[in-house]
Image: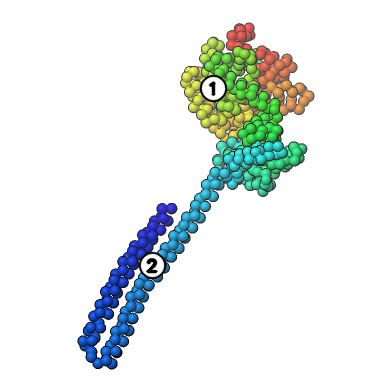
Amino acid sequence: MENNKEPRMINHKSTSFKKMNSIRTSTKIIGFYLVFGFAWILLSDQIILRLFTDQDTLNYVQSVKGIFYVLFTALVFYGIIQKQLSLYVLTILDLKNAYEELDLGHRKSVDLENKLFNLAYYDDLTGLPNKILLEQTINQYASEHANDGVIGFVYFDIDEFRNINEVKGHSVGDQLIKEVADSLKEAIKPPNMLARLGGDEFILAFFDMDDIETFVPLVESYFEMIRKTYILDEDDFFITFSAGVALYPDHGTDYITLMRHADAAVSIAKSKGKDQIVIFDEEMVSMIKQQTEILNQLRQAIPNNEFSLHYQPIINLADDKLSGVEALIRWHHPVKGFIPPLEFISLSEKNGYIKEITEWVFKEAASQYDAWNMKGKRFKISINISAIMLMNDSFIPNLNKWVFESKIDCSKVTLEITETAIISDIEKSIHVLKQIKKMGFNIALDDFGTGYSSLTYLQKLPIDIIKIDRTFISNIHPDTEEFHVLKYMIDLAHHLKLVVVAEGIENLEQYNMMKKYYVDFAQGYYFCKPMPQNRVLEYIKSL
């Protein structure tokens, strides 16, 4: 902008200088004209009278003198008028240039204002309204329709989007987000609104809805449009979405409240298996409050020594001897009493507290190892590793740190990981598992038989043990289809030189079946329930 202003300032100075110079010149000319005029009138007559006596000659000379005077006067006035006209023309040209520059500056200012508006209110990647514009629109509608308005507020995101970013990179993730946005933009018409909050999070806002019965099928029809296979970086990805719905004014009368309640509904949709739409209800509020309360108490459990470890023996089916134990965390709250792991483990994973819990379990199990007095024996402690922990980039450095601080022999520890943790990103999982193996740990694939991809990846994974899930074992009878699948799974595992552990053995029939088909190890209530360390030591003595 400075370059545009500078020429304009130079033109104004030039015009002012020219004007002053013209005035000075005109004054000089007029002064010269007056002196010359008086001198001409007074002196020329005297000179002519002395030089010429003849009246005819005198008249002729006087006429010539008058003509000369008129011509001279005309030249003087011509010079003055011409100077003034030139100054006027230059002034007009300067004004025109200044106006053009001002107009150019105005247009640039308007363009900049439009760019700033777009940056402030629209998403750069998709061109959709952003959170700020959405919030303003929702709150303005609420203030104008306090008694008669209805809004269907749909908050949704892409299931397993994090995996696409990690496997294919953020540029491919951005491509998916743009394709989803482009598909919905064509379908969503004003006054309804599609907005992007950031990442893979979107909002659909439907204003002046008729009724909920037609609204939900409408939303489902939009999700059917985008629930499909996308080609991303030459690979096919079938993409699904989880959505939470909040209604104005039933579930909130402002953007913040609607967003909070829709987010709660999305969490419920995720916990139910994803790829679905959940409508908020008041029970979710109490659930959220309860989860928040548990989370706050959970963060105090380690400092307050509320955690303890119980151990479930793992039995060698070849000789029915104890071969190891699985460490299981227990939380005994001073007021609420025993809180099952299922209630707080998943909550700790969602809120980032799982690292502290995993570290506590590892170090506590390591510190109690010497009490087992199993030196020289093939006795191992199994420790469960969360899927969230396994896929975290800081897991291996943390694990090295825990080993160093606890001084545990890694060969005496089995780390148990779930199948779902592995298949979410198979390549990264293999890389992490190989690093764990190099440290000397044994690796067990837990909950085997519950996932559809187990047999596909068995040969690729650097694991030592598969643990057949208790839900699979409980359905086994000689006349069932599961029976033949179990036999095949055991034979395949042994062919791959993997150790097989059966979980959830609860009766003699299951025990005999596992022995008959050469399952290596077993654990379950048939042998004993998880117990504190001192009771396990007594159990060892009784064997």
Which residue in the rendered view is the most extreme toward the right?
479
Q: Mark 2 or mark 1, which is nearer the start of the sequence?
A: 2
Q: Position of residue 90 (x, y in %)?
A: 40, 66
Question: Relative to residue 24, is residue 120 depicted above or below?
Answer: above
| Label 2 Cα crowd, 10 Å radius (few <14 / some 14-19 / many 20+) | some
Q: Nearer the viewer, residue 283 or 140?
A: 140
Label 1 – label 2 distance at C-alpha:
85 Å
Farthest residue in the left direction? 50
Q: Is residue 23 left or right of residue 139?
A: left
Query: Horizontally, is 253 left or right of 436 in the view?
Result: right
Residue 515 visible at all: no
Position in image of residue 390 (x %, y %): 56, 28
Q: Quadrant of the rendered structure where residue 324 is? A: top right
**Amino acid type, callout 2:** Leu
Q: At which x and y percent is residue 256?
A: 61, 34
Q: Which mark is residue 356?
A: 1
Which of discs 1 and 2 lies nearer the camera? The answer is 2
Which residue appears at 33% of the width and 78% of the height?
A: 73
Q: Which residue is mark 2?
A: 87
Check disc 1 and report its element: helix, strand or loop. Answer: helix
Considering the numbered disc 2 on the image, is that residue within a helix, a strand or a loop?
helix
Q: At label 1, which amino acid type do we have?
A: Glu
* Residue at image location 56% in from the left, 34% down from the top: 428
Residue at position x 59%, y 9% from top? 534
Compared with 364, 40 (above or below) is: below
> Which colouring convention does the figure follow?
rainbow
At 55% from the left and 46% from the top, the residue drawn is 117
